[in-house]
């Protein structure tokens, strides 16, 4: 029996964070520094996404702290970082604009309940159905989205305005301010690139942020800083019951948003879980991650947070900085809270250029550059899916992109199998015509199967041999029934060979035409179908 989503949680925390990494003093130092780096990168992201959603910056910061802390403690993949994300913020815009922030808190609570239910039902395992081309498109699209999100930092502070749907507009930098900004971004990227060659004692992104911040502060360089976005000073998050009417009308308002947010949050989290797992060669628990995301969002909604999910950019920063256990994620959340309640004056002096440089390096490391090289070598449909998911991710959002990619991949697979159905024919010495059906027989190939037969010109005895085929669903059974009915209507005899035992039973009219043999297959075609439709009262 599969283990419960949280069954191994206590053991993983007590021993090594669930990754096989022993918590030695050296490992703890690496984890804490990785957490500090992530926390610094979380600040402008959380503030920016709060602006997108049209809420106060502290709503985004509290969400980053609570969601990050809870998922770090009980999530399915140590090393992942969660917090307020743009993918969720863009969905929240209309809700906040039309009904207010209190409805957002209620929605986040319901979103959490839905995610917990998904985890308990173990539906997270269906992320396995996402094909590899969709994963490549997801990674590439998200890298582009991260890159585009950083471009807003090249606008003159204070020129953007709120239109009720987030911050918009603003004047782009030009002249000396733009050159200075670009130079500091480039310097940060250069430090991150060189640092690992000099020492690994300090995470390269942290070194880049620290050195560039010191340079800006010491020489008084006039560039945008974190404090120019908004003040991050605040107190500890306090329990807050969403101030909404507890009636069915409220439920009707928040339910559609909650379902969409839950779906987007889980898809992004589970795909990030797989991506981090590939980078660290460790598997993660998808159902456990669903429960963790649900608990985190439920708690966040009761403490004035906007909700969140896994953040691929910050997760990449953590992994690249050496974070492998739960300690790094916990440290990132704790450092972020310290920034809010105690160290906001210092954090607000960090130049945005340093954080943009870190995120640009994340973009370079996240984008699947090898996908550009394999485009000509993979099947055209796979290449199309990679490009399609990338474009849809950039133009709309991640959830739509993944759903579109999976649907297109599934349709392409079904069509490919539908065109494989064919039959070899020969005539026996007795004058019977034998059709050797080859290829899978399912809903997509059912019509093609029926068209294989020449009822009018066939002899009086016909044999249909399914030894090289596979009957896959009820549509296939109906197609067999249709063919048998045509031959019987033409007063011709037909025999069906090498069908599985349960197919014998499910064929209502043609069942008496089946010829039993010792080498009949046993693939239990319609076990589920029998239960659903009640065709059979007993077993096989």
Image (tube, rainbow, N blue to C red):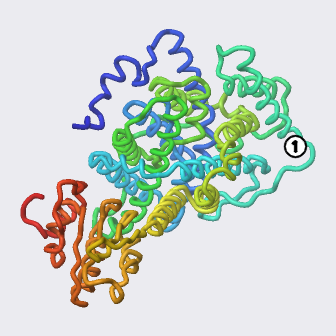
Rendering coords of residue 441 (x, y %)? 35, 67
What number of labels is visible?
1
Residue 461 as seen in the image, left or right of residue 469: left
According to the picture, the residue beneath numbered tag 1 turns out to be 177
Q: Quadrant of the C terminus?
A: bottom left
Q: Residue placed at 32% from the left, 70% from the top?
A: 249
Label 1 CA crowd tier, 10 Å (few <14, some 14–19, many 20+): some
- Residue 233 or 454: which is nearer the viewer? 454
Rendering coords of residue 456 (x, y %)? 34, 89
Vertically, is 447 above or below 376? below
Rendering coords of residue 56 (x, y %)? 55, 50
Residue 498 as seen in the image, left or right of residue 449: left
Vertically, is 236 above or below 441? above
Q: Extreme front residue here?
A: 429
Residue 2 as seen in the image, left or right of residue 439: left
Q: Is residue 300 visible?
A: yes
- Residue 473 or 35: which is nearer the viewer? 473
Q: Residue placed at 30% from the left, 73% from the top?
A: 475
- Residue 189, image quadrant: top right
Q: Residue placed at 75% from the left, 27% from the top?
A: 193
- Residue 406 or 230: which is nearer the viewer? 406
Vertically, is 524 above or below 35? below
Q: Quadrant of the N terminus?
A: top left
Rendering coords of residue 378 (x, y %)? 62, 52
| Dot 1: element | helix
């Amino acid at each position: 029996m599969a283990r419960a989503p949280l069954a191994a949680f206590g053991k993983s925390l007590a021993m090594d964070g669930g990754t096989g990494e022993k918590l030695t003093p050296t490992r703890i130092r690496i984890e804490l520094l990785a957490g500090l780096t992530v926390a610094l990168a979380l600040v402008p992201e959380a503030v920016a996404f709060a602006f997108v959603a049209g809420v106060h910056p502290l709503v985004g910061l509290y969400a980053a702290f609570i969601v990050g802390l809870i998922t770090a403690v009980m999530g399915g993949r140590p090393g992942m970082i969660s917090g307020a994300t743009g993918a969720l913020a863009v969905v929240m815009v209309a809700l906040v604009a039309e009904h207010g922030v209190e409805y957002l808190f209620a929605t986040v609570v319901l979103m959490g309940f839905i995610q917990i239910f998904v985890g308990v039902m173990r539906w997270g395992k269906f992320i396995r159905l996402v094909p590899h081309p969709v994963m490549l498109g997801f990674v590439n699209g998200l890298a582009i989205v991260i890159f585009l999100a950083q471009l807003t930092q090249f606008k003159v502070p204070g020129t953007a305005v709120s239109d009720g749907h987030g911050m918009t507009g603003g004047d782009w930098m030009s002249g000396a301010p733009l050159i200075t900004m670009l130079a500091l971004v480039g310097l940060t990227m250069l430090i991150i690139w060189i640092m690992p060659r000099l020492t690994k004692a300090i995470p390269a992104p942290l070194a880049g942020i620290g050195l560039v911040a010191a340079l800006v502060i010491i020489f008084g360089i006039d560039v945008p800083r974190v404090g120019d976005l908004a003040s991050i000073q605040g107190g500890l998050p306090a329990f807050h019951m969403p101030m909404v009417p507890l009636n069915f009308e409220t439920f009707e308002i928040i339910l559609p948003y909650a379902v969409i947010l839950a779906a987007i949050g889980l898809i992004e989290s589970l795909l990030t879980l797989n991506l981090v797992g590939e980078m660290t060669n460790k598997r993660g628990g998808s159902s456990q991650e669903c429960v963790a995301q649900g608990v985190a969002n439920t708690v966040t909604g009761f403490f004035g947070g906007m909700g969140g999910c896994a953040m691929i950019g910050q997760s990449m920063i953590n992994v690249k900085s050496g974070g492998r256990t739960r300690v790094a994620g916990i440290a990132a959340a704790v450092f972020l809270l310290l920034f809010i309640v105690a160290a906001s004056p210092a954090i607000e002096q960090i130049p945005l250029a340093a954080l943009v440089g870190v995120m640009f390096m994340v973009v370079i490391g996240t984008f699947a550059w090898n996908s550009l090289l394999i485009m000509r070598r993979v099947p055209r449909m796979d290449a199309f899916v990679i490009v399609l998911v990338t474009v849809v991710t950039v133009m709309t959002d991640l959830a739509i992109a993944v759903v579109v990619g999976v649907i297109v991949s599934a349709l392409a697979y079904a069509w490919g199998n539908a065109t494989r159905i064919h039959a070899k024919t020969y005539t026996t010495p007795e004058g019977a015509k034998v059709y050797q059906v080859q290829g899978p027989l399912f809903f997509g190939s059912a019509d093609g199967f029926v068209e294989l037969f020449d009822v009018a010109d066939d002899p009086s005895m016909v044999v249909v041999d399914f030894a090289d085929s596979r009957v896959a669903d009820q549509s296939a059974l109906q197609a067999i029934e249709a063919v048998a009915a045509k031959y019987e209507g033409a007063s011709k005899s037909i025999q069906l060979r090498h069908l599985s035992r349960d197919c014998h039973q499910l064929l209502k009219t043609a069942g008496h035409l089946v010829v039993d043999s010792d080498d009949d297959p046993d693939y239990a075609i319609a076990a589920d179908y029998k239960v659903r439709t009640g065709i059979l009262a007993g077993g096989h």
